[in-house]
Image: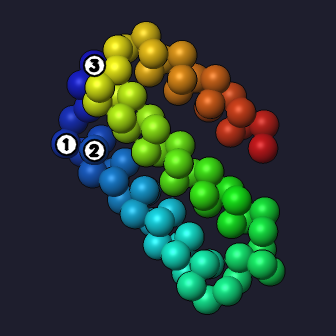
Amino acid sequence: MPLTDLDLLLWLTGFLGHVALLLVLLLRGRARALPIFTALMTLNVIRTVVLFFINHDGSKAIYFYTFWPDGGIQYLH
């Protein structure tokens, strides 16, 4: 099922928020004080990019088997 414009907008705003927060952590030197939080923000940015490209270029099955196990992992942490 293709994403609607609203879906893409919400996905983009979440991604930009994580990128902005990661940049603040790195540029202000807070990454050393908050290494676990910085790693979490880095993981969120990478996860979003990977899922976007899988959604755009991959099949529905590949996206399904990437998205749902990742959602379970997110739930656990």
**Residue at image point 54% right, 23% down:** 66
- Residue type at mark 3 is Met
Image: 37 above or below 56 = below
**Residue at image point 53% right, 26% down:** 67
Q: How is the image coloured?
A: rainbow
Q: Within the image, what quadrant is residue 4 found in? A: top left
Residue receiving disc 3: 1
Give residue 11's position: percent from left, percent from top: 37, 48
Residue receiving disc 1: 5
Residue receiving disc 2: 8
Quarter of the image that includes the N terminus: top left
Image: 12 above or below 33 = above
Identify which residue, 57 or 10, lies in the foreground. Answer: 57
Give residue 26's position: percent from left, percent from top: 60, 78
Residue 46 tag number? none
Give residue 54's position: percent from left, percent from top: 39, 28
Query: Gap in Å between the C-alphas at discs 1 and 3?
Result: 13 Å
